[in-house]
Image (cartoon, rainbow, N blue to C red):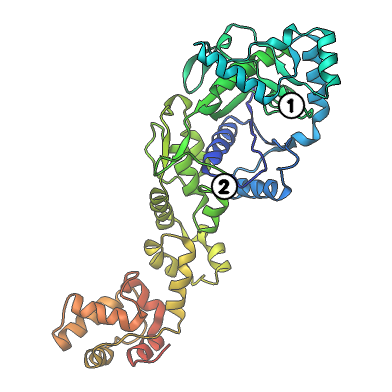
Amino acid sequence: MSKPIVRFAPSPTGHIHIGNTRVALLNALYARREGGTFILRFDDTDLARSKQEYADSIEADLHWLGIPPDVIVRQSERFALYDAAAERLKAAGRLYPCYETQEELEFRRKRQLARGLPPIYDRAALKLTDEDRARLEGEGRKPHWRFRLDPTNVTWDDLVRGHCHVDCGSLSDPVLVREDGTYLYTLPSVVDDIDLRITHVIRGEDHVTNTAVQIQIFEALGASAPAFAHHSLLITASGEGLSKRLGHLSVKGLRNAGLEPQAVASLAVLVGSAEAVRPIADLNELARLIDFSHISRAPAKFDESELEHLNARLIHEMPYEAARERLAQLGADEGEAFWNAVRGNLTKLRDAAEWAKVVRGPVAPVIEDRAFIGAAADVLPSEPWDASTWKAWTEAVKAATGVKGKALFMPLRLALTGLDHGPELGALLPLIGPERARARLAGQAA
């Protein structure tokens, strides 16, 4: 079997959201697993709304997720291919000019509904003579162009949904070219899939009906259709559909929030599948878990609270070597012992910077019982300090004061860190060190 060639085809008209990312990840990771090619195709034929800043943002998002494309193409640079395909379809009688206005089409649609008929285009334009068309164009009308569907039952075996069929006799002939000569999504997409030799089209289930139309266009252009996999869509935790326009869960926003790309990828790929949702740190391992036949057909909820939980689990299991460079960028690389001490209390890696400040200081100690803290300072163990120092010290404080439990531990934590929560002090105390510890116990910022 030939190696797969797949594509992710966003429009650069906004920042991609997590639903778009699900499509990108399923394509990229499937190609990675099978040794195939992952193409980023910018659907930027809408020249007025497409912006380079969004294209740059999409590329940055894919790199951050760990799925940089193997090839990048832009539809705005490929109009000659679409023009040639349109001419072929015109010559074959499959693409025909229509002159109705939107108002006229809406009137016909309402009339058909009133008569109990399906509101599909009645193909009135096919009955126009050359003289009729010349007269309409003389009135200043410009045609839009529809693809003439064969009224057949189009079938395909979907990798997610199984056997699918669409009765094209129940569909309107789709408009492929607007009055101003610009193309709608459908024709350029098919032409690109043929030219780029796409083997698998992996996309959301909202494109299922489009598939029947596209299969007919593939055939009309003398090409075989690729395999199709229409996966379930992601929705917000409250059940809303995702929208670029509304900025729902944009990848840029998730990145800026300090989330790990592997947490985002794990939830986007595994939610709504037979696999348990869990953090997968290695994208190659995540790729091995993709099974299109195990993806549910019901919409899957992408819950930000679940994402935070996955993120924390990834951080808790992250080895120092994986974190070191990023800690250094944060000015928080205090060594492996520091990372092992604090990572279990982090939900985001960047929070390590706060604990680095606690270790290095200065920290303003919180001392509520000076007599107790003074007694604790008197029994501080001698150097060197190690993982056993905290236990030895607290036992000595307990023996000296008779205080135990939370009443013992919390005042020490407040004095040493200025906080009432945090990593185990058994690991943190040697990092704070004797000099800073004595100063803080004396009430000094250190």
Q: Residue at x 42, y 46 (%)?
A: 279
Amino acid type at circle 1 is: Arg
Tell me the quarter of the image containing the C terminus: bottom left
- Image coords of residue 91 (percent x, y): 81, 10
- Image coords of residue 372 (percent x, y): 22, 89
- Is residue 156 in sight in this rendering? no
Q: Residue at x 45, y 24 (%)?
A: 293
Disc 1 designates what residue?
A: 178
Mark 2 lies on a secondary structure that is helix
Residue projecting furthest to the left = 402
Tell me the quarter of the image containing the N terminus: top right
Disc 2 designates what residue?
A: 65
Count of numbered tags:
2
- Is residue 297 in sight in this rendering? yes
Can you say whether 141 is above or below 409 in the image? above
Can you say whether 428 is above or below 402 in the image? above
